[in-house]
Amino acid sequence: MYLLATGTDQQIQEQNFARTFFKMNIVCTMIPGNSNIELASIVLDNCNQDDLIIFFSDSGNNTHINELLTIPLKKRLRLRQSL
């Protein structure tokens, strides 16, 4: 399970989410969103159908995140959006 957050508030939500799953012995990998877009793109490029990617964004109108979302779309991975 990969987690990616866009801003400070979203990073707090991401950390709380990961902490909750860690208590159930499920490790989440937190990908740095705005700070290291190249690393995020490399991770997403290596994802497959068995991976779960969760984006934490306030508006969903983040240019960097929208660019990153094209990677799984090009690979034809299924995307689900939840508000």
Image (cartoon, helix red, strand yellow):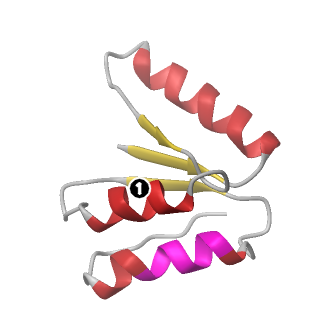
Q: In the displayed structure, does residue 65 sit left or right of residue 79?
A: right
Specify the quadrant of the image occupied by residue 23: top left
Q: Position of residue 59 (x, y in %)?
A: 79, 68
Q: Is residue 7 magenta?
A: no
Q: Residue at x 36, y 16 (%)?
A: 24
In terms of secondary structure, where does tag 1 sit? Answer: strand
Crowding at mark 1 (Cα within 10 Å: few <14, some 14-19, many 20+): some
Specify the quadrant of the image occupied by residue 44: bottom left
Q: Quadrant of the N terminus?
A: top left
72 above or below 38? below
Q: Residue at x 70, y 59 (%)?
A: 57
Q: In the displayed structure, does residue 63 sit left or right of residue 22?
A: right
Q: Residue at x 61, y 37 (%)?
A: 14
Q: Is residue 66 magenta?
A: yes
66 above or below 27? below
Read off the residue under disc 1.
Answer: 53
Q: Quadrant of the C terminus?
A: bottom right
Q: Main secondary structure of the magenta part?
A: helix
Q: How many marks?
A: 1
Q: Residue at x 61, y 69 (%)?
A: 65
Magenta span = 64-70
Residue type at mark 1 is Ile
Q: Position of residue 66 (x, y in %)?
A: 60, 78
Q: In the displayed structure, does residue 81 sit left or right of residue 49?
A: right
